[in-house]
Image: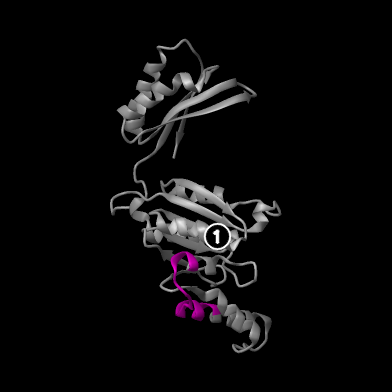
Amino acid sequence: MTSLSTPTFGLIIIGDEIMSGKRQDKHMPKVIELMNERGLTLSWAEYVGDSPERITATLKRAFDASDVVFSCGGIGATPDDHTRQCAGKALGVPLALHPEAKRLIQERMQDTAKEQGVAYEPDRPDNIHRLNMGTFPAGADIIRNPYNKIPGFSCRGAGGGAVHFVPGFPVMAWPMIASVLDAQYSAHFRQNAYVEKSVIVLGAMEATLTPLMESIEAAHPGVKVFSLPSVDHPQWGRHIELGVKGEPALADAAYADLRGGLKTFTLEYGPELVRQA
């Protein structure tokens, strides 16, 4: 990723509870929302159960690439939390107690003791164990947690990939992800408006329209052409939503050419759609 290019953003969601269906993933739709609010796009997402081998392999791929990745879940200190250890293995570095993480965790423990009306005992075994939540791969930076002060962390790989690790709890993860986006990637926020323009094409086959789509995308750099087929829509039945997306001026020109190209086909059409981001 160069200083001028927009990074590719990815999402890793970790936990057996997602894979077993005990909990439904809420992270991906929220991350998409956070990205869209900033004019960014989530390019890929991956789900991984609590298998240290799979987590390590997934994180190694992320570190070896040049993507910006958010990883949700598995950074606690219970036996089924493997993410911190796997991140260290994927990077080939040991875990170490981060000094600032230690301070924040101890501050949280003091707050909790005060709320409960008991004395804070830093040397109590359970409090010592809680410090494991601040052991991160050597060289990691912390991500502050506004909910309960227990931090997440960020690491960079040799391939340029940056992975930002946050808890699995949405109430913690989502503001932490937003803070990372705002602090580190604001230079890539899209300042111009973004628009999708499309038309419902009734009864067509995607294969028939593919050459036209390819020609439009080739002729209009900066614009993406898309097709969303449906076979059982309650109103339009079998149809394709065919359109373009990009900055308004570019999208307008590409859409005009797309509609012009469709005139060579004998097709029926439904409504035109415009979506602004």
**Quadrant of the frame with the C terminus:** top left
Kindly tell me whether residue 108 is visible in this rendering: no
Looking at the picture, the colour scheme in use is one colour
Kindly tell me whether residue 77 is visible in this rendering: yes
Q: Eyeballing the image, is 122 above or below 235?
A: below
| Residue 59 painted magenta | no
* Quadrant housing residue 81: bottom right
Image label count? 1
Q: Eyeballing the image, is 129 above or below 212?
A: below
Residues drawn in magenta = 89-105
The residue shown at (62%, 79%) is 112
Q: Residues within 10 Å of mark 1 (few under 14, many from 20)?
A: many
The residue shown at (41%, 53%) is 67
Asked if residue 158 lies left or right of residue 16, the reply is left
Q: Position of residue 195 (x, y in %)?
A: 41, 35
Q: Residue furthest right?
A: 22
Q: Eyeballing the image, is 232 above or below 146?
A: above
The residue shown at (51%, 58%) is 57
Q: Residue furthest top?
A: 266
Q: Position of residue 131 (x, y in %)?
A: 56, 79
Name the amino acid, label 1.
Answer: Ile
Q: Position of residue 160 (x, y in %)?
A: 36, 59
Asked if residue 99 lies left or right of residue 253, the reply is right
| Viewer-nearest residue: 157 or 180 | 157
Label 1: which secondary element: helix
* Quadrant housing residue 232: top right
| Viewer-nearest residue: 265 or 36 | 265
> What residue is pinned by disc 1?
55
Q: Position of residue 63 (x, y in %)?
A: 43, 59
